[in-house]
C-alpha cells in the first residue's frame, strides 16, 4: 500500500513513536513523507532566566504540568525506533493544506494519508487519498474531542474513556468514522504513567488500523445521539489541584455541556 505520512519537522514524540513503529512493524508498504517546515520556537536567555527564577520563587504548582509533560516525552522517546527518512520519498510544504502539499500528493497518488502533526486537514488534502486519510486521537472520539484528553478524563472522572481512536478525517474535528478504538483499562494512578501507557497503546492501534484498511471490504455501523465533549488547553493550576488529589476527579462530567453527535464505526 502506498502510504504518505503528512507531518511537520517539529513533530511531537507521540507522532514519532507511532510512525516509526508502523514502519518497523510493516516495512513492506511504500512510505513517503510530506513535511511542513515549522521553525522551532527558541527561548532567549532572558526568558530562560525568568523560568528558572519562577520555578525557584513560586511553589504553587504552576510549573508541574510542564515538567510532567516533559517527563512523559522523555519516557516515550525511549521507545522511538530510529528511521532514516532519506530512505523514502520526501516532499516539503510551507503550510498545512497549501498548494505544495496538494501538488506532492497528486504526484504520488497515496492509498492512505496519515495525519501526523501536520495540523487540521481540509478537503483539498484528505480527499486525495484513494482509500482513506486517518488520524490517531489519544482519547475516545467523538465522545472526547480536542486536546489533552487524558487529563480531562481524569479531571471529570471519565477514566473509562481514556484510550485511543484511529478515525477517518472529515470536515470536522475528531468526528470521522472510527477505524479502531481501544480503551486503555489501566490500573495506574498518575497522569505521567497513564499518558505514557496511552501513547504506547496508540502505536499498536495505528498498525491495526492500517492492516484493516489494507484489507478493504468494511461495513459502516452508526450510533446516534452520542454525547460529545470538547476540551482545550490545560490550566496548570487545575492540573496541580488534580495532582494534589492523586488524580481523583475534581468535577463531574454532568457539569459540562455537550453536543449530540453521530458515531460511525468501520467494521470488518
Image (tube, rainbow, N blue to C red):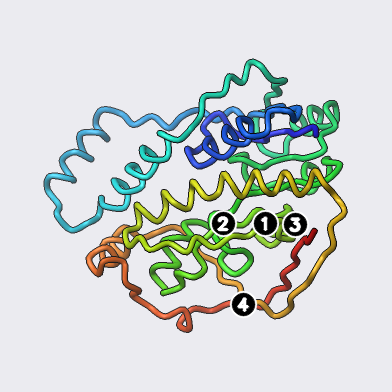
Is 125 placed above or below 149 here?
Answer: above
- Residue that protrudes farthest toward the top in the picture: 86
Asked where in the image residue 130 lies, by quadrant, the reply is top right
**Residue on which disc 2 sits:** 164
| Distance between the alpha carbons at the discs numbered 3 and 1 | 19 Å
Task: Answer with mark 2 or mark 3, whichever residue precedes in sequence.
Answer: 2
- Dot 3: what SS? loop
Contact between marks 2 and 1 (CB within 8 A): the answer is yes
| Distance between the alpha carbons at the discs numbered 4 and 1 | 19 Å
Task: Answer with mark 4 or mark 1, whichever residue precedes in sequence.
Answer: 1
Contact between marks 4 and 2 (CB within 8 A): the answer is no
**Residue on which disc 4 sits:** 227
Figure label count: 4
Contact between marks 4 and 1 (CB within 8 A): the answer is no
- Dot 1: what SS? strand
Q: Quadrant of the C terminus?
A: bottom right
Q: Nearer the viewer, residue 148 or 20?
A: 20
> How busy is the neighbourhood of tag 2: few (under 14 within 10 Å), some, or many (20 plus)?
many
| Distance between the alpha carbons at the discs numbered 3 and 4 | 19 Å
- Residue that protrudes farthest toward the left in the picture: 57
Residue 81 lies, in percent from the top left, at 51, 29
Residue 98 lies, in percent from the top left, at 73, 35
**Residue on which disc 3 sits:** 171
Q: Quadrant of the N terminus?
A: top right
- Dot 4: what SS? strand
**Residue on which disc 1 sits:** 180
Nearer the camera: disc 4 or disc 1? 1
Q: Nearer the viewer, residue 263 or 221?
A: 221
| Distance between the alpha carbons at the discs numbered 2 and 3 | 20 Å
| Distance between the alpha carbons at the discs numbered 4 and 2 | 17 Å
Asked where in the image residue 8 lies, by quadrant, the reply is top right
| Distance between the alpha carbons at the discs numbered 2 and 1 | 8 Å
Amino acid at each position: 500500500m502506498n502510504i504518505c505520512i503528512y507531518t511537520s519537522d517539529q513533530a511531537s514524540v507521540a507522532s514519532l513513536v507511532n510512525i516509526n513503529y508502523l514502519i518497523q512493524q510493516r516495512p513492506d508498504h511504500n512510505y513517503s513523507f510530506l513535511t511542513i517546515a515549522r521553525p522551532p520556537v527558541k527561548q532567549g536567555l532572558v526568558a530562560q532566566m525568568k523560568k528558572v527564577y519562577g520555578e525557584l520563587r513560586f511553589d504553587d504548582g504552576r510549573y508541574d504540568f510542564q515538567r510532567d509533560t516533559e517527563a512523559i516525552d522523555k519516557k516515550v522517546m525511549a521507545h522511538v525506533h530510529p528511521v532514516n527518512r532519506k530512505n523514502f520519498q520526501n516532499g516539503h510544504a510551507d503550510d498545512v493544506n497549501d498548494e505544495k502539499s496538494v501538488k506532492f500528493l497528486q504526484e504520488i497518488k497515496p492509498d492512505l494519508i496519515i495525519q501526523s502533526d501536520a495540523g487540521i486537514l481540509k478537503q483539498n488534502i484528505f480527499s486525495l487519498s484513494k482509500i482513506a486519510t486517518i488520524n490517531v486521537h489519544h482519547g475516545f472520539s467523538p465522545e472526547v474531542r480536542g486536546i489533552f484528553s487524558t487529563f480531562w478524563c481524569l479531571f471529570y472522572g471519565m477514566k473509562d474513556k481514556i484510550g485511543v481512536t484511529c478515525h477517518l478525517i472529515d470536515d470536522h474535528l475528531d468526528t470521522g468514522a472510527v477505524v479502531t478504538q481501544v480503551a486503555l483499562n489501566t490500573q495506574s494512578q498518575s497522569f505521567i504513567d497513564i499518558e505514557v501507557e496511552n501513547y504506547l497503546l496508540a502505536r499498536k492501534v495505528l498498525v491495526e488500523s492500517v492492516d484493516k484498511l489494507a484489507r478493504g471490504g468494511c461495513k459502516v455501523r452508526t450510533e446516534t445521539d452520542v454525547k460529545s465533549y470538547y476540551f482545550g488547553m490545560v490550566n496548570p493550576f487545575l492540573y496541580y489541584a488534580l495532582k494534589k488529589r492523586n488524580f481523583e476527579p475534581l468535577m463531574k462530567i454532568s457539569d459540562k455541556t455537550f453536543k449530540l453527535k453521530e458515531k460511525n464505526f468501520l467494521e470488518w
